[in-house]
Image: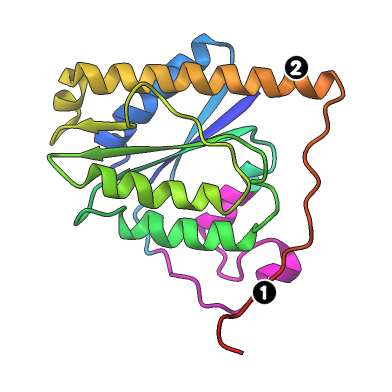
Amino acid sequence: MRVVLINGSPHKGGCTYTALAEVAGALNHADVDTEIFHIGIKPISGCTACLKCRETGRCNIDDTVNDFLDLAESADGFVFGSPVHYAAASGAITSFMDRAFYAQMGGLFAYKPAAAVVSCRRAGATATFDQINRYFTIANMPIVSSQYWNMVHGAKPEDVRQDLEGMQTMRTLGRNMAWLLKSIEVGRKAGIQLPELETPVRTNFIR
């Protein structure tokens, strides 16, 4: 089993990474492989609504989004991490997730557990946490919870490590993710089938 953790911060080894690394450590301790994917600092375009992804399953803008989608093919679960920017997820990870999820709507994310992790100095974490979770609830993904909302506080990695409750929340999240992944695997081996997906029905409110 393998979980990909996405670092949506411009800082590769900053506060968001510190939180994700704590989750990854708990997953590794439970014999789940992990990979932390940093989206990088190059500009990430928003979705241009060209709909080419409906034909290929990949975004027509060939950048880090497609690199991630290639990794996601073999992943069993995901953790998306972001710093708080103006009480919201970073602009980079917002564009990243818009395009990744639109390219794979109803595709490779379905029925794979996911979790959001948020890092902030002081406030705005719950709004960001809610924002990221909305991607999962539109893609048939089970959401993994912890003992508290998945957030850490601090202006730098050393501060985050002193957030003992936040760090414990990250470890609990990793253990819960591992438990759910193993439960799904047991069910699969027992012959329990995934739910049948209906063809999506699109209803416009103005006719």
Looking at this rendering, what residue extends furthest in the right direction?
Answer: 191
Cβ–Cβ under 8 Å for marks 2 and 1:
no
Q: Which of 53 and 109 is in front in this view?
A: 109
Please state if 116 lies on the left or on the right of 199 as rendered.
left
What is the count of numbered marks?
2
Q: Residue at x 75, y 17 (%)?
A: 186
Q: Nearer the viewer, residue 204 or 189?
A: 204
Q: Label 1, on which residue?
A: 52
Q: What span is in magenta?
A: 44-69
Give the Cα distance between marks 2 and 1. 37 Å
Q: In the figure, 155 relative to 196: above or below?
A: above
Please state if 72 lies on the left or on the right of 198 as rendered.
left
| Predominant secondary structure, magenta span | loop
Q: In the figure, 154 relative to 42: above or below?
A: above
Q: Can residue 175 be seen from the camera position used here?
A: yes
Query: Horizontal and vertical percent for residue 139?
Result: 60, 51
Q: Which mark is residue 114?
A: none
Q: Label 2, on which residue?
A: 186
Q: Can residue 9 be seen from the camera position used here?
A: no
Query: Horizontal and vertical percent for residue 123?
Result: 15, 43
Secondary structure, mark 1, is loop
* Residue 23 is a magenta residue: no
Instruction: Name the kind of residue labelled 2 in the image.
Output: Val
Query: Horizontal and vertical percent for residue 199?
Result: 78, 62
Secondary structure, mark 2, is helix
Q: Mark 1 Cα within 10 Å, few/some/many (few <14, many 20+)?
A: some
Query: Horizontal and vertical percent for residue 188?
Result: 80, 24
Instruction: Name the kind of residue labelled 1 in the image.
Output: Lys
Q: Residue at x 21, y 53 (%)?
A: 87
Please state if 145 lies on the left or on the right of 56 as rendered.
left
Q: In the figure, 156 relative to 67: above or below?
A: above
